Amino acid sequence: MRLSPLYILAWTLQASATILQNGQVRDDPYLGQAPEVSVGDGAWRNYGPDASEISYKGRWDSQHISWWSLPGINLGFTGNQLALSFGPQTSEGVLLAYRIGGLDWEFSNVTANASYQFAGPSTPGLDLTQNTTFEMRVTNWGYGVQLSGVSVASDAELVVVPEYNKTVEIIGDSFASGQYATYEGLSAWAYNFAAGLGDVEYSITAYPGICLTDKQCWNNTAPGMTHQWFYASDVGMRAAATYGDHPEKWNFDTHRQADLVIIELGTNDRTNNVTGTDFYNSYVDLVNSVHRTYPQAHIVLMSLWGKFVRSGDTYNQSPSYVSEINRVCQHFKDDGFVDYFGTKGILQHNDIDPQEHPSDVGHIKIASHLMQWTKLKLGWEFGATGPEVQHDTLYWNDEAGYR
């Protein structure tokens, strides 16, 4: 198979990252680091990856391989220990975020054909008198895991965690997947928005470099979202190596219908000089596809903030495809299921990092405005009333006499 430039671009961008805060290196940013453990002895009770108590979040294929942005699992367990085992399709050193209940996120690098213990007798938050909830997310869009099993103490068991009543899907590109944000997907506006709502299930179908239009970007070879949205795997090099030209279809019938879909696409189309007409036609096609798949969903089209260019003694915002996105909204105006979310004025030039993507603060600003829009427009109340959403954003001045 001939690899498209998008695959190559995505692969070269994968690396271990140094997190910078206003140019200063963040000390010890990946606290947690679950130890490797053997689960083959009598101290463990083992479950396969298809156990009904394991709730998969985001897109996973039939081999229990994770794809796209911030896929994960959620489960409940009894006892005082929990381990996850990973199969051969797990990326080397992939960074996972995990937590007990609503406590702060911790992080661990894992690799293929190994088991890691994520909870033990000294883990904060464990209560042997009741069930414990465990959540895990794959932080980076370019890497993934293959879950091969879950293990608990020999006298313990997995239990089902009830799901929330509402479901959100975000469809996007590098901005939604958090490229160059401190914890990638876990710092992206898409996660901050969905997790910030608090009482929703969510899936982030986003990948850096992807266009809305199909095979009009990156030398006219890269699949666009109008095509790839129907597949379990993304458009990265890992997916190409796994599936070649025959990716696995995503089975919408076996997953929950979305109640709300947010679409943020077009930046890569602009980079690849896709015409306004082609962009508009593809956007109409995608909205129609989403509506046919989720006939009860509210679909929100997000405007593109574009670039910020210095002009004299200030900066000017230069958004992309303004008229085209508005025309798409007008096209569906009488149908009542499409809305427009304008981002103009939410971000300023210093909310964009040196890699031309939103900083962590930029992502939080977008998510916060979108949350408030959702509350006012749809009547959804905020349900995240305590558990951590953004991680490592505690910046403050401890000098009481500052002046």
Image (spheres, helix red, strand yellow):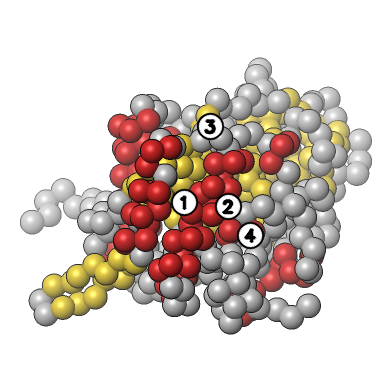
Measure how far apart labels 3 and 1 are at the Cα level: 16 Å
> What crowding class fits label 3: few (fewer than 14 Cα within 10 Å), some (14-19), or many (20 or more)?
few
Where residue 305 appears, x then y in whole percent?
32, 62
Disc with the residue nearer the chain's start (1 vs 2): 2
Figure check: 375 above or below 235: above
Residue 307 vs residue 152, the one in the foreground: 307
Q: Is residue 247 visible?
A: yes
Residue 302 vs residue 99, the one in the foreground: 302
Residue 279 vs residue 141, the one in the foreground: 279
Labels 3, 1: front one: 3
Labels 2, 4: front one: 4
**Which mark identifies residue 296?**
3
Disc with the residue nearer the chain's start (4 vs 1): 4
Q: Which structural element holds mark 4?
A: helix
Q: Which structural element holds mark 3?
A: loop
Residue occupying image coordinates x 31% and y 37%: 372
Q: Would you say the residues marked 4 and 1 are in contact, meaning their CB atoms lie under 8 Å apart?
A: no
Q: Would you say the residues marked 1 and 2 are in contact, meaning their CB atoms lie under 8 Å apart?
A: no
Residue annotated with mark 1: 263
Labels 1, 2: front one: 1
Identity of the amino acid at label 3? Gln
Figure check: 238 above or below 398: below
Residue annotated with mark 2: 205
Q: Would you say the residues marked 3 and 1 are in contact, meaning their CB atoms lie under 8 Å apart?
A: no
- Residue, far right: 41
Identity of the amino acid at label 2? Thr
Identity of the amino acid at label 4? His
